[in-house]
Image (cartoon, grey):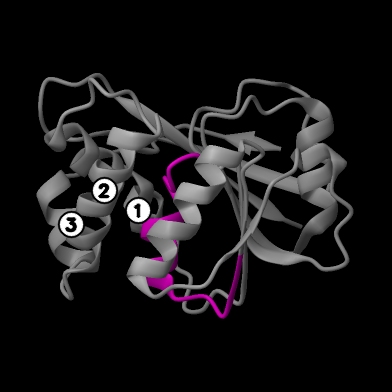
Amino acid sequence: MGESENCFFEVKIEDILQKHGKNGSLDAYLSLLTLENEKTNLVSRETSAADLKRLIAESLVPFEKLELKTVNNYLDIGSGGGLPAIPIIITKNPPESVLIERRNKKASALRRISLELKIKPIVIEQTFEDIVFDKTFDLITVRLVRLSGPILKKISEILSHSAVFIYYGAFQSAKCPPELSYTIYSYAIGDDSPAKAFTLFRKN
């Protein structure tokens, strides 16, 4: 079951960064991401510093509509250069985090960035569909990975009861597992950029 009516809001990138980056850790991540991107194509090399700041802020935009006092077990699928995972780990400080990135060079970059930031996620170099999980998670995120039916079904199976899955995009399939409900939010970031969307799924 899904809904998207009256779920549009506006947000300012600088407000998000100021709210969540008071200890300088988001700035440190920005610097590390920029350096690593020069060696490994984590994001497009044409991405400017301002664009990287926006991507970091957009990683945290869903939490403007989502109240999570604690996150114990966090999973990110297709982590790439650490967006949205690293900003979430920095700001939410979950005791356990798992990042799935099947490409060796990107996984290695994630480990180097994490070491410099003194965070300790588990980085798994496998395809999500091939992994057998022995635990559930109370927060799961997906960005830049096509949300196919089989992937969504597997996510629903490893999502804890009353937990949240954030998809950084507008869910467009009519096939949603019955144990999940979702809301699509659209937002503007206060400049000439087009409106963007994310989808919050909850385990019923």
Residue depicted at 59% across the width and 28% down the height: 171
Residue depicted at 48% across the width and 71% down the height: 68
Tell me the residue that label 2 is attached to. Answer: 57
| Contact flag, marks 2 and 3 (Cβ < 8 Å) | yes
Tell me the residue that label 3 is attached to. Answer: 17
Number of numbered discs overlaid on the protein picture: 3
Query: Badge 3 local density, few (<14 within 10 Å), some, or many (20+)?
Result: many
Indicate the secondary structure of the residue bearing disc 3: helix
Q: Is residue 175 above or below residue 168?
A: above
The amino acid type, in three-letter code, at marker 1 is Leu
Report the front residue among 24 and 162. 24
Left or right for 109, reference 102: left
Quarter where residue 99 is shown? bottom right
| Contact flag, marks 1 and 2 (Cβ < 8 Å) | yes
Indicate the secondary structure of the residue bearing disc 1: helix
Marks 1/2: CA distance? 5 Å
Residue 78 place in picture, x, y as percent: 59, 39
Residue depicted at 20% across the width and 55% down the height: 16
Q: Earlier in the sequence, mark 2 or mark 3?
A: 3
Tell me the residue that label 1 is attached to. Answer: 60
Report the front residue among 133 and 66. 133
Marks 2/3: CA distance? 6 Å
Residue 191 place in picture, x, y as percent: 10, 28
Quarter where residue 88 is shown? bottom left
Marks 1/3: CA distance? 9 Å
Residue 39 place in picture, x, y as percent: 34, 36
Residue interval drawn in magenta: 80-97
